[in-house]
Image (cartoon, rainbow, N blue to C red):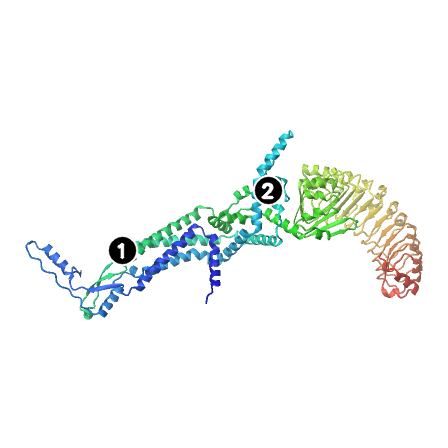
Amino acid sequence: MITLTELKCLADAQSSYHILKPWWDVFWYYITLIMLLVAVLAGALQLTQSRVLCCLPCKVEFDNHCAVPWDILKASVNASSDPGTPLPLPLRIQNDLHRQQYSYIDAVCYEKQLHWFAKFFPYLVLLHTLIFAACSNFWLHYPSTSSRLEHFVAILHKCFDSPWTTRALSETVAEQSVRPLTLSKSKVLLSSSGCSADVDSNKQSLPYPQPGLESAGIESPTSSVLDKKEGEQAKAIFEKVKRFRMHVEQKDIIYRVYLKQIIVKVILFVLIITYVPYFLTYITLEIDCSVDVQAFTGYKRYQCVYSLAEIFKVLASFYVILVILYGLTSSYSLWWMLRSSLKQYSFEALREKSNYSDIPDVKNDFAFILHLADQYDPLYSKRFSIFLSEVSENKLKQINLNNEWTVEKLKSKLVKNSQDKIELHLFMLNGLPDNVFELTEIEVLSLELIPEVKLPSAVSQLVNLKELHVYHSSLVVDHPALAFLEENLKILRLKFTEMGKIPRWVFHLKNLKELYLSGCVLPEQVSTMQLEGFQDLKNLRTLYLKSSISRIPQVITDLLPSLQKLSLDNEGSKLVVLNNLKKMVNLKSLELISCDLERIPHSIFSLNNLHELNLKENNLKTVEEIISFQHLQNLSCLKLWHNNIAYIPAQIGALSNLEQLSLDHNNIENLPLQLFLCTKLHYLDLSYNHLTFIPEEIQYLSNLQYFAVTNNNIEMLPDGLFQCKKLQCLLLGKNSLMSLSPHVGELSNLTHLELFGNYLETLPPELEGCQSLKRSCLIVEENLLNTLPPPVTERLQTCLDKC
């Protein structure tokens, strides 16, 4: 048995589509109901009548049809020319058939002589009505359209009932009502100050309370708090609308199905209106029935009366009127579909009246459905459009973000970085929470993998902010925020996933000292605006550029003459032209990393103020040009690591001021003795080469503090190495050492010793003399520790400090 609850659910499911039914669809519905009543009434009358036809036998036939004697007499009188002839009396007719014979004759005449339209009129009306009803509901149940329509109706109801929709529309109304008042006040202020200016009415409002609203006595829409659950529901609606639009906007199946069913209705209307009025004349009250049953009844011709003829004529005429109304309405709907551009739906009027100017126009099935909804109530489309706007979505994201990231939660993310600065690192968020600007102690703000970040004027509350990191994010800076950053920001790091141009707001940071760009590209032919932009960075001292370029951009060499450090990571691409480096006379540090250089560029030798040169990960095989480094009197740090250098020229001894030398990860087999003329060296790294021995002359490096020969083929250490009394870090791992000299105990300043990966069998007990060496900084196999005397082992175990 079907319960009332199930019936209610069925009724609700049918009524849910009322949004997609225009007025003519509703009109069709009521006409269909009336047609159904006509069919039911006619059918009921036909079924309840015990005798549809009442037939009487015809005793007198005249002119091949049944006639009463009076008709015969009248005909004969008319034929006679003698008016004095007396009229005969009418014959007396008696119908003395049995009741069963009458029933038999009625049935035979009903089947043989009654017209089919008169017999099946109720069923034809019922059939037509069912076809009309099926055409009206076919698109709602057709497999290719029903799921989309059901999905749309569900989304539309949620959009209509969502608190976010009401909030967005009320915000628009509030801004429209306040805008004239705000403009008038601004004009008064301008005129009173003696200045004239144009008010930009198209300026976008910030997502913060506007002072004009409170002064007008209207509450700012953004000041209200959206419930967290409601915010999540609205967010889910945005995602559903995006998916629905993606699946529906590219197709026009719903439009074509709806058009076809209207065409079918028009064709059916033409057919009905063609044959029904014609056959309506066949519904007559009297029927002349000629049946050859004289052997049973004694009569051959009968006169019958169709008892439902008059009422069926009325019902049929009324039915024709209904069909005409139905057909005219169907013709109008067909005309509406053909004359209108229903595959395009524009929100232009709404965009002009609201602050959601980004609402996109839609097309195909999506547009057609919205056109149908407008016929019911345009408010549905208006409320639905709120969830097509990216501006609306971004505002909702901001509110949800603020609800999730409270001040307490953000404070828990504050850490001190390696530079002992208070840093806030936000990773993979939907935006920047407004509560960030409550943490005034932030010194470094790091934003990573945040698709859209907008810095509002509230950033000026971060009075201690000096450093900004933006990694794989898109940052938009408001004008008030840019003014704050221009005065306070000192270090900026930008890293992008895709290659792109430097954001224009960067060139307004006039007090910027360090700029790190990764993923940005400076075009070789830059515009005048970009030239002027770099020219404004007068305080810039450090520039790091990680990109793939063929030459150092002229904008750097020409407009940044005061630059002191230039670091270029070319990501393996070949750097061809380097002559313009000569212009950077104030450069103190130069890094050309992964530039596919085969020789040291000669333009470097003109940089007299250069202190540090880093040529990491290039393709250097020879460094014969190293003799020219003697002209660089201030050069103290030379890094030629991660190359293919096979030998070091003897001219390296001319670099008397060299303090740091990195030659690790090369193919060096021998060390020239002239290397040890660089007596100021305190850092020497020769790791990951092919060295087999170390010259005794290393003892002349009396200032050496760091010495690394890890991963070579050294079998024996010279005694001169242990004459470097200032040595603090000695890395000898992964070599072929068979023993460690007892002179190691003379290195009293040694704090770090690496011996792992050699062929040592014992450790010298003289290690006890290395008073600064800790156990955690002695990198060696565990079994070798057992070869040390217990006092030495105990002393090493007493302190577990890290290196």
Q: Tell me which corner region of the image, top left, top right, bottom left or bottom right, holds residue 510.
A: top right
- Identify the element where label 1 is drawn: helix
Instruction: Return the residue nearer the eye: 515 or 182.
Output: 182
Residue designated by label 1? 281
Q: Residue at x 61, y 44 (%)?
A: 220
Instruction: Quadrant for the C terminus, please.
Output: bottom right
- Residue that protrudes farthest toward the top in the picture: 194
How far apart are the alpha carbons under marks 1 and 2?
73 Å
Instruction: Quadrant for the N terminus, please.
Output: bottom left
Answer few, some or many: residues within 10 Å of disc 2's Cα (few below 14, many 20 plus, some between 14 and 19).
Answer: few
Question: Where residue 117 appears, x then y in whole percent?
Answer: 30, 59
Could one spot residue 438 in this view of the protein? yes
Q: Residue at x 18, y 64 (%)?
A: 58
Query: Which amino acid does the dot numbered 2 rest on?
Result: Ile
Query: Which amino acid does the dot numbered 1 rest on?
Result: Thr
Residue designated by label 2? 218
Question: Where residue 368 appears, x then y in whole percent?
Answer: 48, 50
Q: Residue at x 46, y 65 (%)?
A: 2
Question: Where residue 488 appears, x then y in whole percent?
Answer: 74, 41
Instruction: Return the residue nearer the eye: 520 or 770.
Output: 770
Residue 455 is left or right of residue 28, and the answer is right
Answer few, some or many: residues within 10 Å of disc 1's Cα (few below 14, many 20 plus, some between 14 and 19).
Answer: few
Could one spot residue 356 in this view of the protein? no
Question: Where residue 436 appears, x then y in whole percent?
Answer: 70, 48
- Identify the element where label 2 is drawn: loop
